[in-house]
Image (cartoon, rainbow, N blue to C red):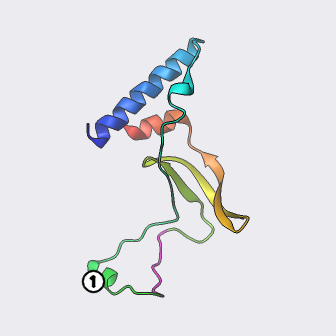
Amino acid sequence: MNETERQEAIAAQFEALQAEEATGADLNLDVILDVPVTLSLEVGRARLPIRNLLQLNQGSVVELERGAGESLDVFVNGTLIAHGEVVVINDRFGVRLTDVVSPSERIRRLR
């Protein structure tokens, strides 16, 4: 199963869960609570030629397309789910979610 088929299967399952929820049927989410997912944060992106990439060394600075102070993108398994800002908690970085993408919008983006 390729990535697109996997995402379509997940979207179909999610739509089925939403349909059950709309009809008032009891949902047993216990079956998916232990499924691991990958959470990633994107500060920004940069596009540069290989020539410039090969010239990078310690101390080099790469300018990102996103401006200072703009929110981060929060992805789960490659799907945008929220935007947030960096926070520091007990000398560790964290992210405070400032805007969460609605479930219907997440499904729309899968297609």
Q: Which residues are magenta?
A: 59-65
Figure check: 93 above or below 3 = below
In percent of width and height, residue 52 lies at 32, 83
Left or right, 50 with respect to 92, comes to left
Please name the predominant secondary structure of the magenta segment in the image: loop
The one of 99 and 30 positioned closer to us in this rendering: 30
State the residue lying farthest toward the right.
Answer: 90
The residue carrying mark 1 is 51
Magenta stretch encompasses residue 60: yes
- Look at the numbered disc 1 and give the secondary structure of its residue: helix
In percent of width and height, residue 58 lies at 45, 87
Asked where in the image residue 49 lies, by quadrant, the reply is bottom left
Q: Residue at x 51, y 33 (%)?
A: 104
Quadrant housing the C terminus:
top left
Query: Mark 1 belongs to which amino acid?
Result: Arg
Q: Residue at x 35, y 33 (%)?
A: 8
Magenta stretch encompasses residue 83: no
Figure check: 31 above or below 73 = above
